[in-house]
């Protein structure tokens, strides 16, 4: 920093208002702790601008004075990308006051929103306009669109609609020096040079600060069918996915896999949850079909399940007959992440492999984990439809939690090595942040890393944007 603390705070207060520069520890605390409490940082202050112009002014000042800036949305990230370091010299730039829905255009099927708008608000606004915004995450009640785009969030609808970056037509981004790159375009086709928006989506705030976006909306489905299905193993689950796609095509919107232990965790720790079946099975699939037609989807779903049973791909199945039952099915899936912390330490992996290789990956990873930590409880679940498995490993019953978590890197090496052998990725949708930053040289081509560093130096030559995140030293 080239200015003293008092001068910095005074100048920032003049830019956004004194009430929106937080310096008291209790006022800043919620901005400094990652939701799993893996990182607990310090900050010079938390700055809460109200609009793009204020973001621009703050970044220009920080760039001129070499002050590190950590952009933050809803603080729901899982890799430490939104948490400041422990120096106390960085500022947290909270975008939550940028919360305006600027425009809804049902003719072009777009919605223009500020970065701080909550994802659930975007979903509800689309619904109120007879449209669908398909991005869906467990944290959708608190995460923000800016954070979703900065991390290229995935979620349960990627199978049908793609990652967050595929749901955007245009972006507004403030660069490190305060200049505003404004391209809030609704166009589906614009072949006038580099498509710069893709530089910033997935960059985790290291190349620029997203302040607004033009989001794609879709026609609202007229009918939805949700099935909870028991399958013998992931091999049959994959065969069921292929059958569903061959019979229902683009109407297959979600295909989530869950192990029995995960269902047991949810049943134990979430009041009111019910097991869909009288018997217990090893593996389950949550399948959702959605159609623009209000006729015939139930019959197609039932025919699909009947055919799958004839092929011995399915052990049991139940089709939701009400919205309440559909919500209950999704509750079993959506609570899987949070309930694991009530069972002790959980070492988490956000891997992806080609869809065809998911069963083989699971077959190999299980024995490898058991050999490394005998008694470890495997809780692999997630988006089988797009190859993204949250390969979480729960501590053995009776093992000391801290002793177990101390083996995080050791277990990472085992699981990640198998994922890479199957042509996979060590980060499917959560990003890199701090958690996986130092793993990149082992999984990325050196030329790729060199190009990433070149882009960082070009767009942020003073290194003020989210220092220490994504790129290894």
Image: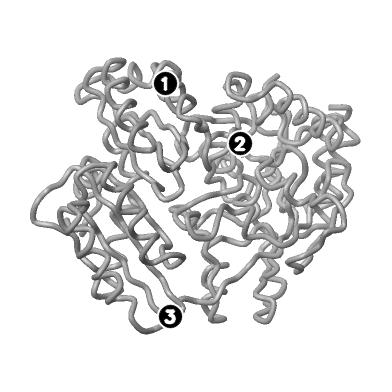
Give the vertical position of 393 relative to 107 (above or below). above
Report the number of discs: 3
Spatial separation of the CA atoms under disc 3 and disc 1: 45 Å
- The residue under label 1 is 408
Q: Nearer the viewer, mark 3 or mark 1?
A: 3
Label 2 environment density (alpha carbons within 10 Å; few <14, some 14–19, many ≥20): many
Kindly report the distance in space between the C-alpha atoms of the residues bearing marks 2 and 3.
38 Å
Residue placed most toward the observer, 179 or 3:
179
Left or right, 224 with respect to 110, comes to left
Disc number placed over residue 81 in the picture, else none: 2
Does 421 appear above or below 320? above
Image depth: mark 2 or mark 3 in front: 3
Image colouring:
one colour
Q: Which residue sits at x=86%, y=49%?
A: 57
Q: Is residue 147 left or right of residue 305?
A: right
Q: Label 2's element?
A: loop
How crowded pointer 3 is (Cα within 10 Å; few <14, some 14-19, many 20+) is rated as few
List the residue tagged with mark 3.
Answer: 222
Task: Give residue 228's position: percent from left, percent from top.
Answer: 25, 59
Q: Is residue 366 visible?
A: yes
What kind of element bears circle 1? helix
Closer-to-camera residue (259/117):
259
N-terminal of the two: label 1 or label 2? 2
Q: Quick one: SS at disc 3?
A: loop
Q: Earlier in the sequence, mark 3 or mark 1?
A: 3
Q: Position of residue 64 (x, y in %)?
A: 91, 36
Residue 312: x and y, percent?
A: 17, 52
Residue at 60% x, 70% y is 217
């Amino acid at each position: 920093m080239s200015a003293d603390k008092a001068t910095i705070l005074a100048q920032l207060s003049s830019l956004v208002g004194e009430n929106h520069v937080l310096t008291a520890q209790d006022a800043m605390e919620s901005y400094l702790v990652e939701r799993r409490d893996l990182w607990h940082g310090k900050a010079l202050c938390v700055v809460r601008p109200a609009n793009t112009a204020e973001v621009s002014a703050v970044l220009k000042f920080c760039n001129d004075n070499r002050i590190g800036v950590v952009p933050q949305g809803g603080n729901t990230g899982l890799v430490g990308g939104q948490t400041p370091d422990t120096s106390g010299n960085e500022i947290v730039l909270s975008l939550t006051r940028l919360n305006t829905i600027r425009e809804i255009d049902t003719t072009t099927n777009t919605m223009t929103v500020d970065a701080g708008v909550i994802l659930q608000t975007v979903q509800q606004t689309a619904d109120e306009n007879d449209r669908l915004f398909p991005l869906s995450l467990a944290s959708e009640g608190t995460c923000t669109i800016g954070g979703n785009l900065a991390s290229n969030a995935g979620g349960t609808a990627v199978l049908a609609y793609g990652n967050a970056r595929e749901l955007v037509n245009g972006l507004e981004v403030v660069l490190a020096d305060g200049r505003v790159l404004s391209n809030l375009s609704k166009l589906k086709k614009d072949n006038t040079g580099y498509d710069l928006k893709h530089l910033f989506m997935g960059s985790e705030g290291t190349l620029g600060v997203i302040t607004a976006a033009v989001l794609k909306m879709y026609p609202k489905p007229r009918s939805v069918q949700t099935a909870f299905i028991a399958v013998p193993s992931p091999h049959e689950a994959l065969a069921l996915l292929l059958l569903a796609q061959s019979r229902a095509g683009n109407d297959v919107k979600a295909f989530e896999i869950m192990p029995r232990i995960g269902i047991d965790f949810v049943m134990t720790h979430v009041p009111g949850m019910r097991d869909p079946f009288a018997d217990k099975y090893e593996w389950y699939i949550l399948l959702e079909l959605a159609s623009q037609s209000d006729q015939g989807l139930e019959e197609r779903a039932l025919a699909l399940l009947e055919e799958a049973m004839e092929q011995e791909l399915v052990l049991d199945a139940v089709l939701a007959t009400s919205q309440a039952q559909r919500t209950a099915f999704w509750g079993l899936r959506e609570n899987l992440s949070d309930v694991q912390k009530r069972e002790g330490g959980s070492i988490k992996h956000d891997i992806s492999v080609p869809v065809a290789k998911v069963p083989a990956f699971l077959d190999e990873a299980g024995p490898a984990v058991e050999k490394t930590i005998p008694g470890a409880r495997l809780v692999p679940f997630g988006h089988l439809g797009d190859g993204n498995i949250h390969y979480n490993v729960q501590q053995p019953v009776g093992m000391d939690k801290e002793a177990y978590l101390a083996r995080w890197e050791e277990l990472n090496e085992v699981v990640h090595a198998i994922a890479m052998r199957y042509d996979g990725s060590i980060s499917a949708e959560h990003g890199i942040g701090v958690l996986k930053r130092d793993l990149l040289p082992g999984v990325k081509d050196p030329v790729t890393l060199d190009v990433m560093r070149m882009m960082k130096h070009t767009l942020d030559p003073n290194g003020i944007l989210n220092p220490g995140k994504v790129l290894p030293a």
